[in-house]
Amino acid sequence: MAASSSQIRADAPVYLLFGDSRVLRERALCEIVAARLSPEDRDTSITRLRGAEVTAEALRQETTSLSLLSPQRLVIIEDAEDLPADVQEQMAKAFPSLAPTVALVLLTGPGQGRQPPLREGLVKALEKAKGQAIACSPGGKKQVAPALVREAAREGKRLHPQTAQ
């Protein structure tokens, strides 16, 4: 179900970024934004909402309306684990009717085990809609050293794997 942020698909209609690392969730979000929107469209094509404040009607309006200013739109729901149950159910039903130029991004903290903290029906609907779930957790001890080496490379530096241990 989960992919790493380096495997982000630019054509997914829905993204679910979940896990205990806010930094990794924000980094994956930046990759989605870069893949979906041109730099000049980013100021006018992103709508950010808070999960606890989203209503079914607001969600419908945001995900079915087209942008007048750019060819693509991103609707980002932060703290999606706070979405009311009825909104999660409506969202699951709405995935097939998303405007083709709109992508929905759900940001959540960690759930139980390696699962996102959302209703099972919503997660299944995301999979059925060809959405993408991305686990944003640093992983166990064995994954820390390779992650440090990758982060150094990302910053243009070189960190020897033995040093990262």
Image: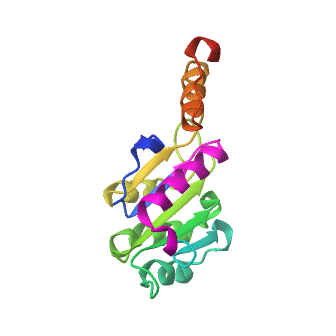
Segment colored magenta: 17-41
Give residue 37's quadrant in the image.
bottom left
Name the residue rendered at 65%, 61% in the picture: 82
Name the residue rendered at 47%, 57% in the picture: 32
Q: Nearer the viewer, residue 58 or 164?
A: 164
Which quarter of the figure is the C terminus placed in? top right
In this picture the colour scheme is: rainbow
Name the residue rendered at 38%, 59% in the picture: 125
Q: Nearer the viewer, residue 77 or 147?
A: 147
Q: Residue 69, relative to residue 104: is it above or below?
A: below
Considering every residue shown, the one lying at the far bottom of the view is 68
Q: Residue 63, relative to residue 38: is it above or below?
A: below
**In the image, residue 141 lies at what x, y percent?**
61, 20
**In the image, residue 20 lies at what x, y percent?**
64, 41
The answer to whether residue 110 is visible is no
Give residue 145's quadrant in the image.
top right
Q: Is residue 149 magenta?
A: no
Q: Nearer the viewer, residue 65 or 111?
A: 65
Name the residue rendered at 34%, 76% in the picture: 97
Q: Nearer the viewer, residue 65 or 155?
A: 155
Give residue 112's quadrant in the image.
top right
